[in-house]
């Protein structure tokens, strides 16, 4: 058991509010960062690099962070990570305000576009490192606050708060703020992260992991222990690989989504932000119905159905050109993204021993989230390579189609590995 464990609604409400505030800041960045990049360059590869920079820390830093969260107070790690993001975004907002607009009235990038683009890469990378610390620590902290039998419900509400802030409120608000000034969404993000840090600092109790049995192994050996535990666990290993493929394939399209929205669909910043709310509405619905879907279909069946829906939804986006069909498709996908998240996060929190929770979670996210950087770079490269052959429009559509086909191929591999029988066996072994 974590020392100083502080269960109860008060601690959970503070964590919930801190999570919502931090995700509002993240949601503003979902639109502000790629939109600023599109004002600085029209090169799909350079825009993809901005998104990849935010995800590279999951490849480089996820494993060490797992060992760190199994050594230090997880609440303080959450709070200090949000503090770091506050400082970074505040500094970047001031830089934007001092250097003037990103582009003139003709849309031509300014002379300082190259320097701003480098600064944007650095911001995305550093904020990404802080995000790795925050997300892994927050998810590891939750089982110390909420009883095990209420984890699915608590995760569902936490995901709902994250989704409303990150996808429903943040993106359209960013679109409106960009219309006032490009620096404004970065400034508001800094304030939102500051509030999240303050809330996390006020959660009562100490949340250090339980002491190790014997002397500490050293950081590298502790990372290896978490890696081996996950790799030997057939169900969680299969879920991590499945998540990695899902995220990498989706990242193919995400890499150039801002260009797709601008050039194929013809959206301005406000409409692009509004488009992002489709998946948010679906995710909020999914956060409430995921436990019901899990009980009705059983968890394994619900996970496999989620892969099918996501594959069809991703592929169909590449064939659409109108706002509302796109919005509706992302809504449906959002329901099943949330269903996948609620089921798999709850499984990890109930199957992994507390003393290993941070390390194993980080290894899981190394596979599941580290692939996003790879998929993002491949998406930008795919557009750049194929554009001379098929033209700009179909080059921007193709990543969605490739993503959908990749996820259907994944279904064949995942079918015998993440079904109801493997889940029942894993739960029985853990009990």
Image (cartoon, grey):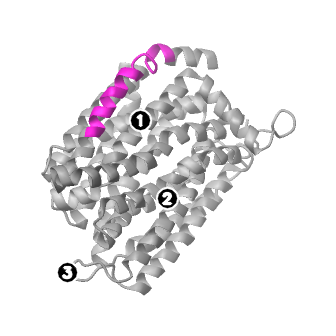
Quadrant for the N terminus in the image: top right
The residue carrying mark 1 is 245
Residue 336 occupies which quadrant of the picture? top left
Asked whether 196 or 71 is in front, the reply is 71
Q: Nearer the viewer, residue 357 or 414?
A: 414
User: In x, y percent, where is residue 58?
Assistant: 54, 48
Residue 266 as seen in the image, left or right of residue 274: left
Nearer to us in this view, 2 or 108: 108
Q: Mark 2 sits on what residue? A: 22
Queried whether the magenta region covers residue 242, the answer comes back as no
SS label for mark 3: loop
Q: CA distance from mark 1 to mark 3?
A: 40 Å
Residue at the image position 14 percent from the left and 46 percent from the top: 320
The CA distance from mark 1 to mark 2 is: 27 Å
In the image, the segment drawn in magenta is 402-422
Side of 407 relative to 158 (left or right): left
The residue that appears at 46% across and 19% down in the rendered structure is 417
């Amino acid at each position: 058991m974590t020392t100083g464990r502080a269960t109860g609604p008060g601690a959970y409400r503070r964590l919930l509010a801190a999570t919502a505030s931090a995700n509002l800041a993240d949601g503003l960045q979902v639109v502000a960062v790629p939109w600023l990049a599109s004002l600085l360059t029209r090169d799909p590869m350079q825009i993809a690099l901005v998104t990849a920079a935010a995800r590279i820390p999951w490849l480089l830093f996820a494993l060490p962070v797992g060992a760190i969260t199994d050594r230090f107070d997880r609440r303080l790690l959450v709070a200090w990570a949000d503090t770091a993001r506050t400082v970074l975004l505040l500094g970047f907002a001031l830089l934007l305000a001092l250097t003037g607009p990103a582009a003139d009235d003709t849309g031509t990038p300014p002379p300082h576009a190259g320097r701003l683009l480098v600064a944007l890469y650095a911001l995305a990378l550093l904020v990404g490192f802080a995000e790795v610390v925050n997300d892994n620590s927050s998810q590891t902290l939750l089982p110390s606050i909420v009883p095990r039998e209420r984890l699915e419900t608590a995760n569902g509400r936490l995901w709902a708060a994250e989704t409303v802030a990150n996808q429903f409120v943040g993106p359209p608000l960013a679109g409106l703020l960009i219309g006032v000034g490009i620096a404004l969404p970065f400034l508001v993000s800094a304030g939102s992260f500051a509030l999240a840090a303050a809330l996390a600092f006020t959660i009562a109790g100490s949340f250090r992991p339980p002491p190790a049995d014997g002397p500490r192994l050293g950081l590298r050996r502790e990372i290896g222990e978490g890696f081996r535990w996950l790799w030997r666990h057939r169900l969680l290993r299969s879920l991590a690989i499945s998540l990695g493929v899902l995220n990498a394939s989706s990242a193919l399209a995400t890499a150039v989504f801002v260009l797709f929205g601008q050039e194929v669909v013809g959206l301005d910043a406000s409409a692009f932000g509004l488009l992002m709310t489709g998946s948010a509405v679906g995710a909020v619905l999914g956060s409430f119905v995921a436990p019901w879907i899990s009980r009705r279909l059983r968890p394994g069946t619900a996970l496999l159905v989620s892969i099918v829906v996501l594959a069809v939804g991703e592929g169909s986006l590449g064939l659409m050109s109108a706002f509302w069909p796109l919005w509706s498709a992302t809504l449906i996908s959002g329901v099943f993204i949330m269903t996948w998240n609620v089921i798999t996060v709850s499984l990890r929190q109930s199957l992994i021993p507390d003393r290993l929770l941070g390390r194993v979670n980080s290894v899981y996210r190394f596979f599941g989230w580290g692939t996003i950087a790879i998929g993002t770079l491949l998406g930008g490269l795919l557009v750049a390579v194929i554009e001379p052959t098929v033209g700009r429009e179909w080059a921007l559509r193709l990543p969605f189609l490739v993503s959908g086909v990749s996820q259907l191929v994944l279904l064949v591999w995942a079918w015998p590995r993440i079904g109801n029988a493997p889940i029942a066996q894993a739960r029985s072994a853990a009990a």
